[in-house]
Structure formats: structure tokens, C-alpha cells
Image (tube, rainbow, N blue to C red):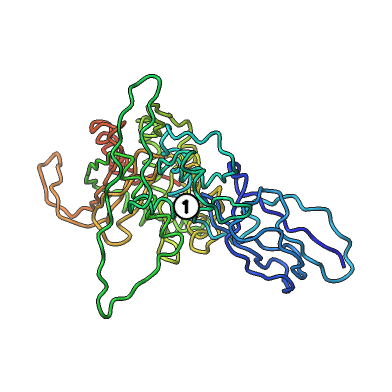
Amino acid sequence: MAEFQLIMPKMGESIAEATVIRWLKEEGETIEADESVLEIATDKVDSEVPSPKGGVLKKKLYGENDVVKVGEPVAIIELAGSESAPAPSTPAPMENAAPAVVAEKMVSDAVETAAPASADMSGGSRFYSPLVLNIARTEGISMGDLEQIAGTGNEGRVTKKDILAFVDDRKNGKVSAPAAVPTPSAPAVSVKPDTHKTPAISVNAGDEIIEMDRMRKIIAEHMVMSKRTSAHVTSFVEADVTNLVMWRDKVKDSFLKREGEKITFTPIFIECVAKAIRDFPMINISVDGDKIIKRKDINIGMATALPSGNLIVPVIRNADRKNLVGLTKDVNELANKARNNKLSPDDISGGTYTLTNVGGFGNLMGTPVINQPQVAILAVGAIKKKPAVIETPQGDLIGIRHFMFLSHSYDHRVVDGSLGGMFVRRVADYLEQWDINREI
């Protein structure tokens, strides 16, 4: 019988390896073509790996929690029939290895970028996966402490479960916090251990205990990390979007007939945000220690609800270079992929600014949490009709207008109130000045 090697697929340019979470098939079981064989995880995504050919799982080459490099075989599948044994396949991009269950991008690059720069991860005697090293940097775990953790993975490797258990033990006082390390340029400074402890929760009769799913745990970690990293400030502006609403009502039917796409408010918001970023490029930055990274590209993430109720942030790349038709098609495509769990790692990477629509839940405004390693995020509220004073050459009149609140949260370490406030005001100006006669 011919054999086929199932290869660890490529999952994005920056990902070189992945951890086996769970085998979905056991040795000796039959596998249909395109049926998922195992689940894998990196610090960016969780995904299922399908087999491109049908057959029988002859041998697992790795166990659960083992780290496998991209391009390496993970299993041997015995093919049915008399096919000749093919050469090992070229690692396919993860978008072709779908369906992918993609973890919240709000976590993606944040761990690496927001990790303390002072953590020395060199000189270890064991191999550590990028995920484990990223967690160690984020939690301030030195290589010396990392070396003392008993690994439960293959050949004693430290797994994500091992290091998170170490973090929990340290917070609960079972392991002493690392001492401050002096640097040649500055005297040693003693650092107080994190004494914050989660309050005890009582469980009463009738209460239901619900285990967080993996994605919700990652989102929770990312939100707490963001609040600890950035000094959050939020500015609010109310915009009169009457012309914009009237224009969309006028063109939506013809647009759907011509393009086969529904035009929502989201691509309009993204266009105005992209224009404002070009006016204020210091909003489009990240922070690395005491250095500011000014981004060349304007890649706008849009917070999108998944069927599970969790949120994910697919990214519109080079939003400032696309017209409204292109933005509409990108928005609709990414939203559909999110709803069907078909987002690829590339779809959720590289964002430089984020837009979230709290108006979709009927909320007027909100105080969104910054999506690290970005420095700002804009929340748009529900559009509501209200009476307003209208200035005319003949005098002031009272009329019914459409209004919307914009809530702009930004990192006060690098974005002052003047910049954060002027930026959201400029977005509002672009919305208010929308040409009701605009052709599309």
C-alpha cells in the first residue's frame, strides 16, 4: 500500500512552528479526503489540519503538546488503492488548509511587541517554542526561572500549560517572583512583586459554572494585558451624519444591483478613518520600549462578531489606497469569512488601527480597549434621530437630524489629548461633510 506524509502547513510568514493540541483521529482509523486529522496551535491561531488524501492513519509522528516545525511531517497515512507514493507535499498556506478556527487577532502580535524588552531569553539549555518564550517575556520570567520549570512535553519540553501553571503559582505565592536585575547604565531597582489576587468567588445553589473556551481565555488575557500596557484615555465627539445616511439610502439599491454587494456604513467609516490617519500619521504608530514605530501602511482592523459570540479583528490592508467599492467588497468578504470560521492568519494580521461598531448592539458610545500593539481604537455608536438647531441665511430653524457618537480611546504614553481629540474630530468632519451627490 502506498503511503502519504501529512505535512505541518504554513500558517503565515512569521510562524515557523506549531504545537499539537489534540489528535482527531487515532492510528488505524479511516480518514476521508479533506477530513481534519489534528488540531494545532501557535501564539496567533488555533487550526485544524485536514488530509488532502483519504486513507488510514498509520502512524502519528508526534504526541499532544509536541512542537512541530512548519514543513515537517506529522503523520503517515496509508493510501487506499494502488497509488504510487507521492513525494512529501509542499506546505500549503493555512488559508488552503481550512476550515481554520482562528483565535482572536487582538492577541496576535501583541505578546511579542508589548513584552518587556528587559527579559533575557538567551542562554537556555533546552529548546523553547516561540509561544512559551513570548509568555515568559510578557510575565517577566527570566531564563533562569524558565530553566527550573519541569516540562511535561516531549523530551521534557515546557508547554504552554506548564508555563501558565508556573505563572499562577507565582501569583499565588507558591513561587517567589524574580528579583530585579541591575543594568550597567543604571543602579539596581527593587521591584515589588505583583500582590494582586483574584477575590474568592462563592458559588451558591443554582449557580451555573461555565468553562471559558480557548478563544475567550485568550481575549481575556489580551484585554488585561492592554490595560496594564497602555495609559487609556477616551475622547468623545458627536457627529451629524444626516447627509451620509441620506446618501446611503439613495444609492444602496443601485449599488446592490450593480455590484452584487450590500453597502453598509462600515466601509464609509473606514474610508473616513483612513483619510484622518493620513492627516494625523502619529496615530498610526506602535511603541517598543522607549521607541516609536511609525507605520507606513494604513491597515484598519474591524471588530467582528463570531458565531460563538467572541470577537475577532480581520484587517483591511492599505485602506487609504482603496475606493469605496473596494472597501465594501473587502468588508463583506472578511465579515462572511468570520461568520463561517474561514479567516486565515493573513486576514487577521498586520493591523495598525482598529474600528469597532458598538452601535450594532444599540449602544450610543463606549470606551473601547486598545488592540495592542496599536495605540488607538475608535468606537462608533448607534445613529439616532434627534431635533437640532439648523443655521440658515434666513435664521435658525429646528429640524430632525441623524447624530452619532464617536469614542476614541488612545495610549496617553505617546498620544496626547490634543492629537487624540483632533483626530476623532477630523473623522467626524469627514463624516459630516459627506457629499450627498457623490457618484459611486
Q: Residue at x 76, y 70 (%)?
A: 56
**Residue 268, image x, y percentages:** 39, 47
Instruction: Return the residue nearer the eye: 361 or 288.
Output: 288
In the displayed structure, would residue 376 be above or below residue 151?
above
Residue with the most extreme top position? 185
**Residue 340, image x, y percentages:** 52, 64
Q: Assign a secondary structure to mark 1.
A: helix
In the displayed structure, would residue 153 be above or below residue 1?
above
Q: Residue at x 33, y 40 (%)?
A: 229
Instruction: Return the residue nearer the eye: 396 or 286.
Output: 286
Indicate left or right for 342 with 376 as reference.
right
Q: Which residue bears the numbered disc 1?
A: 331
Residue 266 seen in this snapshot: no
Q: Residues within 10 Å of mark 1 (few under 14, many from 20)?
A: many
Q: Residue at x 54, y 57 (%)?
A: 46
**Residue 189, image x, y percentages:** 31, 29
**Residue 181, image x, y percentages:** 39, 30
Residue 395 seen in this snapshot: yes
Q: Residue at x 23, y 31 (%)?
A: 418
Q: Which amino acid type is shown beneath numbered disc 1?
A: Val
Query: Which image quadrant: the N terminus?
Result: bottom right
